Amino acid sequence: MAVKNRQYTFNWEGSDRKGNRIKGEMPGMSIALVRAELRRQGITPIKVNKKAAALFSARKKKIKSRDIAIFSRQLATMVAAGVPLVQAFDIIAKGGENASMQELVLAVKADVESGSSLANAMRRHPSQFDELFCSLVNAGEQAGILDTLLDKVAVYKEKTEMIKSKLRRAMVYPIAVIAIGILVTVILLIKVVPEFQKLFANFGNDLPVATKMVISMSEFVQEWWLLSFIVVAGLSFSFTRARKTSDVFNDRFDQVILTLPLFGGLLRKGVIARYSRTLATMFSAGVPLVEALESVAGAAGNRVYARAIMRMRDGVATGQQLQMTMHQSKLFPNMAVQMVAIGEESGSLDVMLSKVADFYEREVDEGVDSLSKLMEPLIMVILGGLVGGLVIAMYMPIFNMGKVM
């Protein structure tokens, strides 16, 4: 059952194998499919009706990684408290505010009720539950420690979301402020500068060079603003399309962003933190190192590191130590390599990797704070240069006229 297919909630009444009258709710795409599912569960359906949508029902929104992180923590808490799995799904679904997430939870619940394992039920929704997530859940089910592994999954998801959020904030804030500054500048060029231009037409004196430049910019923007908007929109669309479809573009892009001043180092630390946290979580769950590295490569978030981790996996598969393959990749700092070496020698690799992850998560946190403090005055200078420069250029003829008078 795919989340992308339209699902509804149905109220049903029926009788079990003993003839007892029972009723309940079930998600499904049609009444016929719900009846078939009830029969498969040993229930003879008597009445199946589509449930009317509530006036203030949950809104259907795209499922985000943050939703999965919250779901992981809720499920881990309930299973650890001894709540049966199916009942936990019901509680989580009823308490959700996102209708799409409710459908996902109920779809997983229906698969589990029909006899599927939790890991296999989740694997039917790869867009929401990646292979790393499913592998950890499968390991917990096989070893009989699902509550422990779900807690590890929840911690991993929470830490990963925290790093993503901090890196996103570091990148989005300056871009958003500069974009607003450019928008204000364009509005000034289109609406304000022409009014000054009419005023200067009556002066008779030659205008300063800066004023002439601003007027020329205003005339250009007024004449070509629509074409400029189309070009910018086209470039944005092309960029988004290339990020979704072009492997070559993504390889180059991920390589370039690691070399950016100020941001590049922060992004590297974020990737190293994610690598360490993911590998520590999988290794502590008993997943073999070679298999774990393959999943870690998919969760790295950067193609440069993903390719390096796959090469490391090949090296480990041939008998090399992990710390040696990390050193050969030349992408990991000496501190991380040495900590991994200590972990391999002492048999506590998961503990050392967790310490590496904790260290670089703190580094990212402090780096974002420092970058924000640095960017604020820099952004003010840029905005002041844009807006203040325009204002000064437009008032220069008035100042000069005052001197003459």
Image: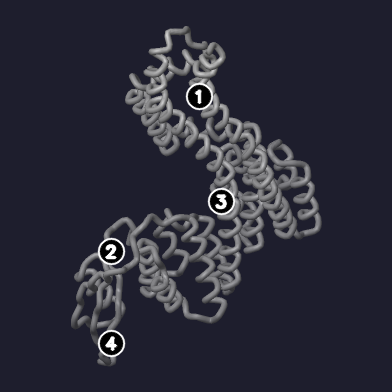
Q: Please state which of the two labelled residues, at mark 1 or mark 3, is closer to the viewer.
A: 1
Q: Please state which of the two labelled residues, at mark 2 or mark 4, is closer to the viewer.
A: 2
Horizontal side of 367 relative to 192 (left or right) equals: right
First in sequence, mark 4 or 3: give its number: 4
Residue type, label 3: Ser
Q: CA distance from mark 2 to mark 1?
A: 56 Å
Residue 390, label in figure: 1
Q: CA distance from mark 3 to mark 2?
A: 31 Å
SS for dot 1: helix
First in sequence, mark 2 or 1: give its number: 2
First in sequence, mark 1 or 3: give its number: 3
Residue 61 in the image, given as x and y percentages of width and height:
36, 57
Horizontal side of 10 relative to 169 (left or right) equals: left
Q: CA distance from mark 1 to mark 3?
A: 36 Å
User: For mark 3, what is the residue?
Assistant: 165
Whether 79 is drawn above or below 129: the answer is: below
Q: Are marks 1 and 4 in contact (CB under 8 Å)?
A: no
Crowdedness near tag 3: few (<14), some (14–19) or many (≥20) residues, C-alpha within 10 Å: few
Residue depicted at 25% across the width and 87% down the height: 15
SS for dot 2: loop
Q: Please state which of the two labelled residues, at mark 1 or mark 4, is closer to the viewer.
A: 1
First in sequence, mark 2 or 4: give its number: 2
Residue type, label 1: Leu
Q: Please state which of the two labelled residues, at mark 3 or mark 2, is closer to the viewer.
A: 3
Residue type, label 4: Ile
Toward the viewer: 353 or 155? 155
User: For mark 4, what is the residue?
Assistant: 22
Q: How many marks?
A: 4
Q: CA distance from mark 1 to mark 4?
A: 75 Å
